[in-house]
Amino acid sequence: MSRSDLPQYTWAGRFSEPTSELVARYTASVAFDCRMWRQDIRASLAHATMLARQGIISQDDLADIERGMAQITREIEAGEFVWSVDLEDVHFNIEKRLTALVGDAGKRLHTGRSRNDQVATDIRLYLREAIDAILALLARFQAALLELAEQEAATAMPGFTHLQVAQPVTFGHHLLAYFEMTRRDSERFAECRARTNRLPLGAAALAGTSYPIDRHLVAELLGFDEICANSLDAVADRDFAIEFCAAGSLLMMHLSRLAEELVLWMNPRFGFIRIADRFCTGSSIMPQKKNPDVPELARGKSGRVFGHLLALLTLMKGQPLAYNKDNQEDKEPLFDTVDTLTDTLRVFVELIPGITTEPANMRAALRQGYATATDLADYLTRRGLPFRDAHAVVGRAVRRAEELGVDLAQLPLAELQGFSPLIEDDVDRLLSIDGSLAARQHPGGTAPTQVLAAIDRARRTLAGALGPADG
């Protein structure tokens, strides 16, 4: 097909020769931005409604536009719509088809707007819906965490610092740490949504339009909270996309930390948990293997989201106002971030209920690490010994237990009293794992009763986030 046979661009009147086929392919975005077709049609219908109410186009034109858009919707949903690279993007593809269906009314649709504010509006609509879906998935993930935490509220395990046994905690308490991380993630996405939910349409190319448009009406029709206050900023801004990728990066970092722990805990050297077979794979050569591929892949996918954040920051850092073609490159990183977050959350929602614990192995690890040493230091401090002196006394006791190959709780009372006469026979309760857990009896502590109370509070915060189908 020669260039003369191809559809003419809207700007063809300005140029003396057609666009090169290579340039057409290089500049086309329809292969990836076609996912915004629903948003484009919705925004166009709102724009057309406003134009008709303002008397800028006729009611007959509006009826034709609505009829044409309904036909295009049916064609796309049925897989019959022909997407053309030569028409560059989702917006021009839909406009050309509309014009073919309804004639001049389709040509009048673009009155008072530019592709600059059209693109900015569509991407905000798309991202707003994506954030809502991610928030719902986050709530389901959190609900799964809380369910498992409740089951394991009293299951003792080592808490680690420097990946060395530190103090006893419960598995339920450990899971609640991830609830708190993702609660902050939810807050960030909600705040990002609020800043995304501002209408650029009406800014036109960069300076606004001379037509008597009603931007507030369009904002109301599309569910935007407010309009973008400056026409230059409206078309040039991609802060909302960067902010989304930043929030997504933090979420993926949190999920990656959980994934790392799942991988460690599943390792036989730990043996703290088992992950259901449906989330694992085997080896092509070693028949005994059971690999935690899902957590490993989630850990790896965090890197691509981090990369998208950096890509968008780099994309925007050198652009003068207002719109530049560079901004076409915002969509693939943004779309892939949405897809990665969505897929990772979906699989984790299913994976968490597939985790079972090995409490005996967890307790055995606690006994190997002198996890109640701090409890003994606190015990001595409560009896009047300065904490630094108590720290030294317990350090010597630990060294002795290590020499004998026993836990602190297994040292005879007489030997313990040799380190400090303040130690009495009630120390046994404090040196036990369950005694140590029970002593952390304050909000945010790891005592099983506090864990259950925290779960109850967390469930109340989720009540409004989970819809009827999820509840």
Image: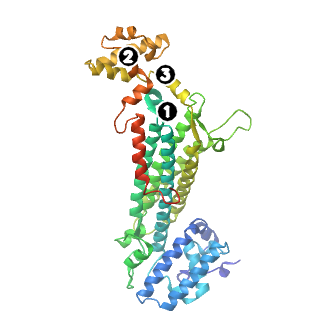
Residue 208 percent location from the top left of the image: 38, 78
Whole-angstrom CA distance, mark 2 to mark 3, is 16 Å
Q: Quadrant of residue 417?
A: top left
Which is more foreground, mark 1 or mark 3? 1
Left or right of 325 in this view: 295: right
Name the residue: 25% across, 18% down. 384
Residue to which mark 3 is pinned: 367
Q: Quadrant of residue 351?
A: top right
Q: Position of residue 324 (x, y in %)?
A: 46, 68
Which of disc 2 and disc 1 is earlier in sequence?
A: 1
The residue lying toward the viewer, choosing from 93 and 189, is: 189
Q: Amino acid at mark 1?
A: Thr
Q: CA distance from mark 1 to mark 2?
A: 27 Å
Camera-side residue of 214 and 113? 214
Q: Residue at 42% of width from left, 39% of height from top?
A: 451
Residue bearing mark 2: 395
Quadrant in which residue 401 is drawn: top left
**420 lies left or right of 28:** left
Which residue sits at x=48%, y=63%? 127
* SS at badge 1: loop
Residue sitting at x 42%, y 10%: 412
Question: What residue sits right under mark 1 in the picture?
Answer: 155
Tell me: 282 left or right of 114: right
Between residue 106 and residue 342, name the one nearer to us.
Answer: 342
Of marks 2 and 3, which one's residue comes earlier in the chain?
A: 3
